[in-house]
Amino acid sequence: MNNLVKINPSFPQRHWLQKAATILRTGGLVAFPTETVYGLGADALNPAAVEKIFAAKQRPGWDPLIVHVRDLAMAESLASELPANFRPLAEKFWPGPLTLVVKKNPRVPDAVTAGRPNVALRMPKHPVAMTLLMEAGLPIAAPSANQFGRPSPTRAEHVVTDLGKRVDLILDAGPTQLGVESTVLDLTQSPPAILRPGGVTREQLEALLGPVTLAPSVADELARQGLAGPGMTQQHYAPRGRVELFEGDRQIVIERLSARAAELRQRGHCVAALVSDEMLPVVEPVTELVASFGVWGDWEKLAQRLFAAFRVFDSQGAIVILCVLPPAEGIGLAVRDRMQRAAGILTKQTS
Ligand code: TXA
Ligand code: MG
């Protein structure tokens, strides 16, 4: 049986959402769209169902999952205590691309949190995700629906490629809007710490909270202690082609990137480049595979298209992928993080 169904993104068909909810309630896996990327969902309170997520993604057991909630009451039921800044953050940014890490309630299985005392909670802003949460009446544990280490899925076909029949049902509502994942904010630290930059920007958080810090993610922390296993965290969000990054003002990036493309091509490599519209006339003549994200400075568009571009270049056999690295502000911080990880540059963020 085909496990992929087309869903209207704004007015999801009830019939399919009810079917998906039944799968979740009986311990199965459903891939569904959120405003960031597609998630691979299971009943967060059913340890056996949660284990299936780890198996399907080949995700190491030390990497905890985000739990998606339909309302504040559900979030409260999964936490043991909520710090004072939780409610103002949830009121301002939920539903939306912000994940809040708080002390967990004993109801939350260890499989979800990888044995940690904290749980990550998020209310997604997508009609399909929200309707699914309502229909199922359950908190849904869901990481990105990609194979571990690969770029996150921004289209249902990416889920099919990576996970195929290991998912009981895939709800296809077309491309996701943001393209990069949620911001993970740890509220158990003071000041609050960004463990992963994402859709809600550092500037937006600081406008509400005052200064927040950037701290290592669970994977970074374990890698630092040598506990994550070789190769497990060096590259993340990564295409098969080798990623090279170019940073600076537009003219400098155009010159350096096109010179590098020409050099690699001369050596016989299949070169791909993800560039801005203005760069096309210079880059196209010296590069085999070129895609544009839009005009220079439109980093939202770059965020939206990055992972899909990686996958297209992979399917075309790119050996090297040249990318423009945006400045570390707004959504640029999240895009830089993903690109640097894809390039295998483990960023040791400390401030
Ligand atoms: O936008 C998103 O966040 C997507 C959609 C599907 O919601 N989900 C997602 O999940 O990106 P995943 O599993 O690919 O990334 C979750 C991140 C990981 O870096 C994980 O280490 C961190 O959140 N995380 C989850 N639970 C945590 C916890 N209890 N403490 C610290 N970090 C946690
Ligand atoms: Mg992921």
Image (tube, rainbow, N blue to C red):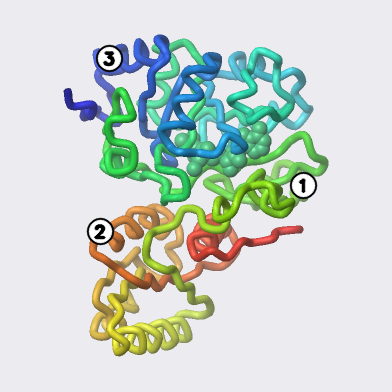
The answer to whether residue 309 shows anywhere in this view is yes
Q: Amino acid at mark 1?
A: Gly
Q: Nearer the viewer, residue 259 or 165?
A: 165
Q: Residue at x 41, y 43 (%)?
A: 147
Q: Residue at x 58, y 58 (%)?
A: 333
Q: Nearer the viewer, residue 253 or 216?
A: 216
Instruction: Name the residue furthest right.
Output: 190
Q: Classify mark 2: helix, strand or loop.
A: helix
Q: Residues within 10 Å of mark 3 (few under 14, many from 20)?
A: some
* Residue 265 in the image, given as x and y percentages of width and height: 30, 84
Residue indicated by mark 2: 315
* Residue 67 in the image, given as x and y percentages of width and height: 55, 26
Q: Amino acid at mark 3?
A: Arg
Residue indicated by mark 1: 210
Give the alpha-carbon distance from disc 1 to disc 3, as whole Å: 42 Å
Q: Nearer the viewer, residue 207 or 201?
A: 201
The answer to whether residue 332 shows anywhere in this view is no
- Residue 14, numbered label: 3
Q: Residue at x 78, y 27 (%)?
A: 83
Classify residue 348 by image quadrant: bottom right
* Residue 234 in the image, given as x and y percentages of width and height: 57, 58
Closer to the chain start, of discs 1 and 3, is 3
